[in-house]
Image: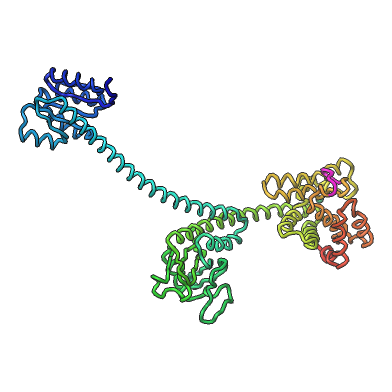
């Protein structure tokens, strides 16, 4: 049995006998054999089959072996070509070799000689292809490594930029942005000191207003005086100021290190960078970063991060300022509502303001957080905003309200909470407005909540609300007698009011802190 060989051979000759002999012999050796009568036919075969080696005669009708060789060289130089001719001439030989022919056999051809030539050609072809593949693979590997490295760098940069964006997105007040900015400068730009300066171009002034130092960084102490006072000692250095104005003038980030700084930097600064921070194309100030003594210097990437941070901070400040503006506008509109209600109802003129102040006194004495006090401030001013929905004849009715009228009045906490809900803001404030008429024993309205089911700040507001209602001087009547006031307040402990809040109330009342508020005339 003949060995299995997978190669496919093409024999091209105008002599049928030669093709027959070759076919019979090489098929018996396991090769697949295709044949063609001239160059043109051979090209057809090459188009439609994968050929591992092609044997061709030179002199043939229509297209000779040399044209075929040229065609193969141009179109697929991985197909080795062996030329067989009965009339070798030097010219022929040279021409065919130029056309990439790999071997030359002279007729009459010994089949064994052809086979040896074939084996050699196929071996060389395998090597040739392997070599091409290897080179491709090598180039591919190098390219992949390079791309990987670039990708890793881009990825790192993206991560840092993402973190910067997330950090800014978490901020709620524009005042926090600058502090955050200098902290991030330490974290992401590897700085010893990060500082934000307000810049006033017209008065030629730079004013450092926020700065941060990295842990363990050598302090950038003024070596002349050893001073560590002020914001930080280098903040006003004339060389630094000069560089800040350079960056502002060019409207470009600037990086200077002592290697190339040529005395541009103060002695104790090894590397310094600065980038302008603009809001709506108006300069606010500059973000700067310092590296002290040591071998570290800022690089281009640090400068890139610095300018990314300044840009992100600028947009965060812009949107926060917008938000704060809208928020304040909205608040102002709501206060105007409250004022309108109070104007309709002379009994309660300034009531909301006083209730807020009393509630804040209680909250402070109870050591509630600044955030809770902010919430109470908004909720206190808006607590009766739901009265806007109640008709004058009920709201302003001088005598006792009947059951139906009282039920309408009782809706005002719900209406108020709904108004705030529609604005999509102040969830916690909204709950205080809703629950400011709940009672500790569960008999209040609108939901009959009991004890600690009522939010603490609503319980505080309820004490302040009732106290102001009975203790304030009014335009048409004097305040209630003190005994009566205290009877209602202290007597309500545990029923109407949270006893712990009444204890605090008692202390503040006895200290005269509350009467000062309610004694104010309208
Ligand atoms: Fe109320």
As drawn, 500 above or below 414: below
Seen at 19% across and 26% down, the residue is 43
Q: Nearer the viewer, residue 111 or 454?
A: 111
Q: Nearer the viewer, residue 90 or 246?
A: 90
Q: How many marks?
A: 0
Residue 211 can be seen, yes or no: no
Residue 309 can be seen, yes or no: yes
Q: Residue 312 at what x, y percent from top left? A: 52, 56
Seen at 83% across and 45% down, the residue is 449
Seen at 48% across and 63% down, the residue is 276
Image quadrant assignment for residue 255: bottom left
Q: Residue 381 at what x, y percent from top left? A: 75, 55
Q: Residue 413 at what x, y percent from top left? A: 79, 47
Asked if residue 13 lies left or right of residue 195, the reply is left
Q: Nearer the viewer, residue 76 or 4?
A: 4
Asked if residue 467 lies left or right of residue 29, the reply is right
Q: Which residues are magenta?
A: 444-451
Q: If the image is split into quadrants, where does the C terminus sit?
A: bottom right
Q: Nearer the viewer, residue 416 or 250?
A: 250
Residue with the most extreme bottom position: 225
């Amino acid at each position: 049995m003949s060995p299995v060989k997978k190669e496919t051979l093409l024999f091209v000759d105008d002599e049928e006998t030669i093709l027959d002999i070759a076919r019979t012999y090489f098929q018996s050796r396991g090769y697949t054999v295709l044949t063609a009568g001239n160059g043109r036919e051979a090209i057809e075969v090459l188009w439609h089959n994968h050929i591992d080696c092609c044997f061709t005669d030179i002199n043939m009708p229509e297209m000779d072996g040399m044209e075929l060789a040229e065609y193969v060289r141009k179109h697929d130089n991985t197909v080795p070509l062996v030329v067989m001719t009965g009339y070798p001439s030097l010219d022929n030989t040279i021409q065919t070799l130029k056309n990439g022919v790999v071997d030359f056999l002279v007729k009459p051809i010994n089949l064994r000689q052809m086979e040896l030539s074939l084996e050699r050609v196929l071996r060389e072809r395998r090597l040739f292809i392997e070599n091409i593949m290897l080179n491709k693979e090598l180039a591919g590997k190098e390219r992949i490594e390079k791309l990987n490295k670039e990708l890793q760098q881009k990825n790192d940069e993206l991560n840092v930029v993402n973190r910067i964006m997330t950090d800014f997105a978490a901020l709620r007040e524009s005042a926090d942005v600058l502090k955050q900015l200098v902290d991030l400068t330490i974290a992401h730009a590897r700085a010893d000191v990060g500082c934000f300066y307000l810049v006033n171009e017209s008065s030629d002034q730079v004013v450092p207003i926020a700065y941060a130092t990295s842990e363990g960084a050598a302090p950038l102490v003024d070596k002349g005086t050893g001073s560590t006072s002020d914001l930080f000692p280098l903040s006003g250095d004339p060389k630094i100021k000069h560089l800040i104005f350079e960056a502002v003038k060019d409207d470009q980030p600037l990086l200077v290190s002592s290697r190339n700084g040529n005395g541009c930097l103060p002695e104790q600064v090894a590397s310094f960078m600065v980038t302008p921070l603009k809001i709506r194309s108006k300069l606010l100030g500059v973000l700067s970063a310092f590296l002290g003594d040591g071998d570290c210097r800022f690089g281009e990437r640090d400068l890139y991060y610095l300018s990314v941070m300044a840009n992100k901070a600028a947009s965060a400040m812009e949107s926060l300022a917008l938000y704060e503006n809208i928020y304040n506008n909205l608040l102002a509109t709501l206060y105007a509502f409250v004022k309108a209600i109070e104007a309709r109802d002379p009994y309660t003129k300034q009531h909301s303001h006083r209730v807020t102040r009393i509630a804040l006194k209680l909250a402070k004495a109870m050591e509630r957080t600044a955030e809770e006090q902010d919430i109470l401030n908004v909720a206190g001013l808006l607590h009766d905003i739901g009265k806007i929905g109640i008709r004058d004849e009920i709201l302003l009715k001088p005598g006792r309200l009947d059951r139906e009228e009282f039920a309408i009045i009782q809706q005002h906490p719900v209406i108020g909470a709904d108004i705030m809900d529609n604005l999509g803001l102040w969830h916690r404030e909204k709950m205080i407005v809703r629950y400011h008429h709940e009672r500790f024993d569960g008999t209040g309205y609108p939901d009959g909540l009991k004890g600690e089911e009522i939010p603490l700040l609503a319980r505080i507001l309820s004490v302040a609300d009732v106290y102001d209602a009975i203790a304030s001087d009014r335009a048409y009547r004097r305040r209630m007698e003190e005994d009566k006031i205290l009877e209602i307040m202290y007597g309500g402990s545990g029923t109407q009011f949270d006893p712990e809040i009444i204890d605090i109330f008692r202390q503040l009342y006895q200290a005269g802190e509350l009467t000062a508020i309610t004694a104010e005339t309208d």
